[in-house]
Amino acid sequence: MVRRALEARGARGTVVDLGCGSGRLGACLRDLASRYVGVDAVRYEGFPDAGEFLACDLDSGDLDSGAVPLPSATADVAVAVETIEHLENPRALVRELTRLARPGGWVVVTTPNQLSALSLATLVIKHRFSAFQDVSYPAHRTALLEVDLRRIARECALTDASCEFSLQGRIPLTPWRWPRWVSRAFPCALSDNILLIARKPETSGGDRGR
């Protein structure tokens, strides 16, 4: 999903991945990323040798102070894949992604899709979204809707915001997934995950491109 969104916009260059885990995104984007920097609380086994790792507790409450040890405007793409739902302060995460993105660069966030058929059915039956049941707590603590992601993007002064979907989703009450052609016809209802991609505005004068 992330690769598809970046390829469609011709995005390349330095990728900074907050909540990188084992760095699988770096492997997925290796021909698009000239530099891959993964940030997480610990370095997980399997993190790619070609990548750079930085330790940072993203849920420490200090993100507003620039806790990620990188200069502003470092990234052509600043991304957080399935990370924002783990944090107490989702807005602080997007502000930090925005700080890290260069002018004209991209900010990308993915999270469980609360408006999928599976999630809405679970909400009706169990009074909880599918990815936020008791078994997932406290790992999953912040459920965000598409409208929330768009609002946060606006609050961060990001432009060209768009939401896309994974086109992969589990059929309610079964272990099976919807066929891809069906998911393409109803992307929001039949996708388990949603992606927000938005652009940091270009600045003028000598700051352009930094």
Image: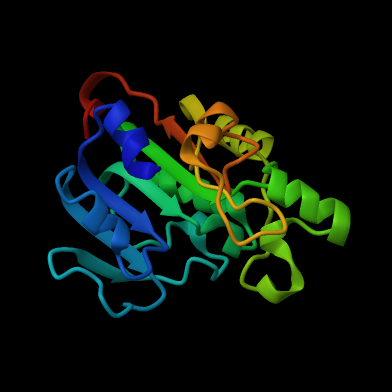
Numbered disc total: 0
Q: Is residue 156 visible?
A: no
When the figure is inspected, residue 24 is found, relative to residue 205, above or below; the finding is: below
- Quarter containing the C terminus: top left
Residue at screen point 48% across, 58% down: 65
Q: Report x, y in % for residue 150.
A: 60, 32
Quarter location, residue 205: top left
Q: Nearer the viewer, residue 209 or 175?
A: 175
Residue at screen point 20% across, 65% down: 52
Q: Report x, y in % for residue 48.
A: 19, 68
Q: Is residue 92 visible?
A: yes
Q: Is residue 123 left or right of residue 37?
A: right
- Quarter containing the N terminus: top left
Residue at screen point 78% across, 55% down: 122
Q: Report x, y in % for residue 170.
A: 60, 53
Q: Which residue lies most toward the top here?
A: 204
Q: Report x, y in % for residue 169.
A: 57, 48
Q: Nearer the viewer, residue 8 or 95?
A: 8
Q: Nearer the viewer, residue 166 or 35?
A: 166
When the figure is inspected, residue 76 is found, relative to residue 22, above or below; the finding is: above
Residue at screen point 14% across, 45% down: 31
Say how the picture is coloured. rainbow
Q: Is residue 79 left or right of residue 210?
A: right
When the figure is inspected, residue 53 is found, relative to residue 162, above or below; the finding is: below
When the figure is inspected, residue 1 is found, relative to residue 162, above or below; the finding is: below
